[in-house]
Image: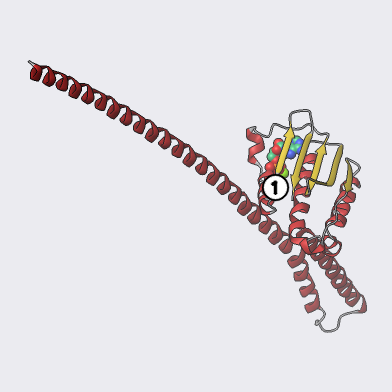
Amino acid sequence: MKDTTTSFLSNNINEALSYIFLVFLLMSIIVILFFYFSRKKIIQKEIEKKNLEINHQKELLRSVILTQEAERKRIAQDLHDDISSKLNVVSLNTHLLKTPNLSDDELQDITNNITDLTQKALENSRRIAHDLLPPVLEKFGLHAGIEELVVEFNSSKVVNVIYKNDLMFDIADIDKHLHVFRILQELLNNSVRHGKATEISIAFKSIDNQNTCIYSDNGIGFDSNSDSAQKGLGMKNIESRINFLNGTFSLNSSLNNGVKINFTF
Ligand SMILES: Nc1ncnc2c1ncn2[C@@H]1O[C@H](COP(=O)(O)OP(=O)(O)OP(=O)(O)O)[C@@H](O)[C@H]1O
Ligand SMILES: [Mg+2]
């Protein structure tokens, strides 16, 4: 009798233990599956984020290449139209000088032509070089370069640009400063071209030990997420230049509220 009771009890315990083991096994499987799927989801999200970043970088690179090509085309056109064509005529005129029995008047005409055209070719080559790298920037640094840019914009009388600078720029950092200069050139062009701004402010300050540029205009503003704002190359180039400078960029604008931009470099 005692044996049957013991065996019954032991059977029950075994059964209970089996159930507990099964429940634990099931729970462990559920927990493992849960972690597996949530981890998979996290990794998938990370991959998606990385893909977005890569696509964005690709887009930036594309705009840099497109701008470079456009710039090359413009320089080629400038060289062709403003230099080569003039030197061509200079060359024709110099050959004319070899013509025998030229009268004094003819000689005068030809030499005047040559002086005139070489003078123009010289001026044009200076303008092309100036566009590529403003000499004032190279000789006197960013501050003087921006002052000159501001004077050029203000001379149009369409817009009043106010420029303040609390920073000291080291001429050795000219490569970096050329990026800052090009960013401001693009921002000013956009404010006048798209924003129809009449007042623009540029201020350089040190904020939290960071060289910061605070830029604003009183133009019509825009929605930076709109399709039309995504089409241009200017803002994308600004972003790549900011990347080169290891800086940050923030833009605040809405329709009819002008544009406010802060960037660090
Ligand atoms: N200061 C501004 N005021 C109003 N709209 C602006 C301003 N800056 C940019 N935008 C808007 O953002 C768009 C994108 O500017 P972005 O400089 O990238 O291109 P773009 O000026 O149209 O062409 P690109 O610079 O390539 O010649 C502009 O077309 C314009 O609609
Ligand atoms: Mg632009």
Q: Based on the displayed image, in which of its 4 quarters is residue 18 positioned?
A: top left
The quarter of the image that holds ligand 1 is top right
Residue 239 seen by the camera = yes
Q: Position of residue 123 (x, y in %)?
A: 84, 64
**In the picture, which quadrant includes the N terminus?**
top left
Q: Image point 73% across, 67% down: which residue? A: 84
- Residue located beneath label 1 in the image: 238
User: Colour mode?
Assistant: secondary structure
SS at circle 1: helix
Q: Position of residue 106 (x, y in %)?
A: 88, 75
Q: Is residue 221 above or below residue 207?
A: above
Q: Position of residue 80 (x, y in %)?
A: 71, 63
**View extreme (left): residue:** 1
Q: Amino acid at mark 1?
A: Ile
Residue 194 seen by the camera = no
Q: Is mark 1 within 8 Å of ligand 1?
A: yes
Q: Image point 77% across, 57% down: which residue? A: 177
**Foreground residue, 171 or 163?**
171
Q: Image point 62% across, 49% down: which residue? A: 63
**View extreme (top): residue:** 1
**Foreground residue, 230 or 158?**
230
Q: Based on the displayed image, in which of its 4 quarters is residue 225 positioned?
A: top right
**Foreground residue, 2 or 218?**
2
Mark 1, Cα crowd under 10 Å, few <14 / some 14-19 / many 20+, is many
Q: Is residue 249 above or below residue 71?
A: above
